[in-house]
């Protein structure tokens, strides 16, 4: 599988880093685009530098390189994930503004009917942000908010990250066992009277 991964300037860059690690383990070809603000957030939230994260990908593209292969619909990548997806990036994708390589590659996904997964990480959400989410969903994107499940009783931050990354991999069609899936026996039954 050939996947574009965009890491934009929102909290939660660890999600994108973990996704790159697992995609590499699965033998997927990855094209990475990191925004300048995401690089700053990496320094705040993680022990990774932008250069460290670039090494996890097969290809790394500058965020303003419109000559990159993934800027063209004729380049046959399979899917794209923007993880995390800042509200500014979401807004640009919703309006069709292709002023960065991330938004251009996302636009390519939508026009070519390829899988586009956006992982916004913001709370609370304004009406403008909600409308932008509706707009991208109507255009064909999948909006997967960074809301990990707790029924598996995660014991670490890493396990919480894996729940969300596992869901992204599911949507990409990449088999994984990163998290415990819901089973009927997970539910606590109540006796009906």
Image (cartoon, grey):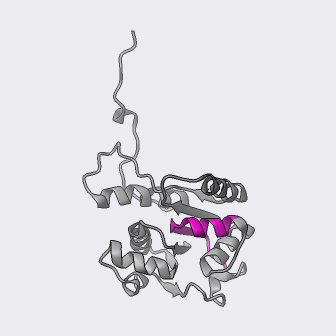
Q: Is residue 83 above or below residue 193?
A: below
Residue at 41 percent across and 66 percent down: it is 12
* Quarter of the figure with the C terminus: top left
* Furthest residue toward top: 193
Q: Quadrant of residue 44?
A: bottom left
Image coords of residue 191 (percent x, y): 36, 16
Image coords of residue 77 (percent x, y): 62, 75
Decide which of 60, 92 is in the foreground and name it.
92
* Quarter of the figure with the N terminus: bottom right
Report if residue 14 is visible in the image: yes
Q: Is residue 85 magenta?
A: yes
Image coords of residue 25 (percent x, y): 39, 72
Residue at 72 percent across and 70 percent down: it is 96
Q: Is residue 160 above or below residue 151?
A: below
Image coords of residue 78 (percent x, y): 61, 71
Residue at 54 percent across and 57 percent down: it is 171
- In the picture, measured across the screen, residue 22 lies left or right of residue 156, that is right
- In the picture, measured across the screen, residue 55 lies left or right of residue 136, that is left
Q: Quadrant of residue 76?
A: bottom right
Residue at 43 percent across and 81 percent down: it is 39
Decide which of 100, 77 is in the foreground and name it.
100
Q: Is residue 66 magenta?
A: no
Q: Is residue 122 above or below residue 21?
A: above
Decide which of 108, 34 is in the foreground and name it.
34
Write the start and end of the magenta stretch as one range. Answer: 76-94
Q: Is residue 154 above or below residue 101?
A: above
Q: Quadrant of residue 110?
A: bottom right
Report if residue 173 is visible in the image: no
- In the picture, measured across the screen, residue 65 lies left or right of residue 11, that is right
């Amino acid at each position: 599988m050939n996947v574009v991964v965009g890491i934009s300037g929102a909290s939660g860059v660890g999600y994108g880093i973990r996704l790159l690690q697992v995609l590499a383990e699965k033998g997927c070809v990855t094209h990475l685009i990191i925004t300048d603000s995401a690089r700053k957030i990496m320094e705040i939230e993680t022990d990774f530098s932008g250069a460290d994260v670039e090494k996890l990908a097969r290809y790394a593209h500058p965020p303003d390189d419109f000559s990159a292969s993934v800027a063209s619909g004729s380049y046959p990548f399979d899917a794209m994930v923007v993880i995390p997806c800042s509200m500014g990036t979401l807004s640009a994708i919703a309006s069709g503004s292709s002023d960065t390589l991330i938004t251009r590659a996302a636009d390519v996904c939508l026009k070519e009917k390829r899988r586009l997964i956006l992982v916004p990480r913001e709370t609370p959400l304004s009406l403008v942000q909600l409308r932008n989410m509706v707009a991208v969903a109507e255009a064909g994107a999948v909006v997967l908010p960074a809301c990990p499940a707790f029924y598996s009783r995660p014991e670490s931050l890493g396990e919480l990250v894996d729940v969300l990354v596992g869901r992204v991999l599911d949507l990409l069609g990449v088999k994984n066992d990163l998290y415990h899936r819901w089973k009927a026996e997970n539910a606590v039954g109540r006796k009906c009277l």
